[in-house]
Image: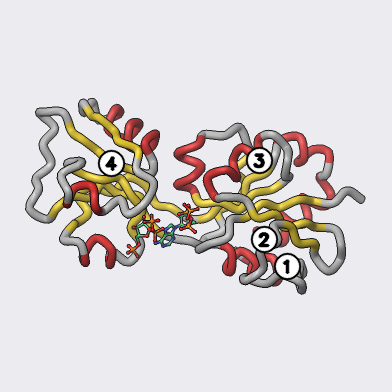
Amino acid sequence: MDVVKIALAKGRLADDAIVLLQKIGINFSDYSKKSRKLIFIDDSKKIKLVFVKSSDIPVYVEKGAVDIGIVGKDVLLEKQADVYEILNLNIGKCKICVAGHKDYTMNYSKKLIVASKYPNVAKNYFNKKGVFTEVIKINGSVELAPILGLSDVIVDIVQTGKTLEENGLVVKEEIHDISARLVVNKVSLKTKNGNIGRIIDGLESIV
Ligand SMILES: Nc1ncnc2c1ncn2[C@@H]1O[C@H](COP(=O)(O)OP(=O)(O)OP(=O)(O)O)[C@@H](O)[C@H]1O
Ligand SMILES: O=P(O)(O)OC[C@H]1O[C@H](OP(=O)(O)OP(=O)(O)O)[C@H](O)[C@@H]1O
């Protein structure tokens, strides 16, 4: 039988995703967080776990380099890949929000400068509202942008709200609820249906 390849990112979702896979009998005994290895095979030798940068997962799945991806909805909204989004795994829950300095009042009557790791999400959101924006792509520590005057607001992930609070920012608008999704390559779903179907059914029964 063909080996099924699952892409996952090292980082926040990894531990919870591995626990979900364990719950449906897929165990990676040789996996260790400290390892620099990028591919692990499960104990039954039928499934490979491939560690990919989170923002690269949609393209790996779309192109069929892996069959399945476990990835945040934020990444899917940003990348718009041609994949099947099959399941909400209900892990990695957070929100993607517009945030700004607590004293800043949203002003749609002039150009809004937005900094974000999610430029497409930001553009789509403000375009739909008919707001004229300039979006600046930032790769991390996004909260700094309004503090240092790089932007009026940010579009970023908020979970506990601690990062915003400790930096004097507040949520101005909520854009989308986020959680991890199971995505599947369109061809793989047909050609490896038995194996992939079992993984989907198993996960569906526990999430
Ligand atoms: N603070 C958070 N709390 C909960 N979930 C989060 C939080 N930040 C991000 N996430 C979710 O977890 C996913 C993985 O986040 P993680 O921080 O591990 O990776 P990343 O920031 O996308 O990757 P990288 O560190 O390589 O840029 C995100 O895509 C999002 O769906
Ligand atoms: O609401 P909170 O629970 O405080 O979580 C939100 C923070 O988590 C994420 O950052 P991350 O830790 O991934 O850092 P980076 O984006 O700066 O790399 C996100 O970009 C926020 O900064």
Q: Nearer the viewer, mark 4 or mark 1?
A: 4
Q: Amino acid at mark 2?
A: Leu
Q: Amino acid at mark 3?
A: Tyr
The residue beneath circle 1 is: 24
The image quadrant where one finds ligand 2 is: bottom left
Disc on the earlier residue, 4 or 1: 1
Q: Nearer the viewer, mark 2 or mark 4?
A: 4
Please state if 97 lies on the left or on the right of 79 as rendered: left
The residue beneath circle 2 is: 203
Contact? badges 2 and 1 (CB < 8 Å): yes
Disc on the earlier residue, 3 or 1: 1
Residue, x 65% and y 55% (percent of image)?
A: 51
Numbered disc 2: secondary structure: helix
Please state if 123 lies on the left or on the right of 75 as rendered: left
Disc on the earlier residue, 2 or 4: 4
Residue 172 at x, y percent in the picture: 19, 49
Q: Which mark is residue 115?
A: 4
Residue 153 at x, y percent in the picture: 21, 44
Disc on the earlier residue, 4 or 3: 3
Q: Residue furthest right?
A: 1
Q: Residues within 10 Å of mark 4 (few under 14, many from 20)?
A: many
Residue, x 23% and y 47% (percent of image)?
A: 145
Q: Amino acid at mark 4?
A: Ala
Numbered disc 3: secondary structure: helix
Distance, label 3 to label 1, CA atoms, is 24 Å
Residue, x 88% and y 48% (percent of image)?
A: 2
Q: Amino acid at mark 1?
A: Ile
Query: Is 7 or 21 nearer to us in this picture?
Result: 7
Numbered disc 4: secondary structure: strand
Q: Residue furthest front?
A: 36
Q: Nearer the viewer, mark 2 or mark 3?
A: 3
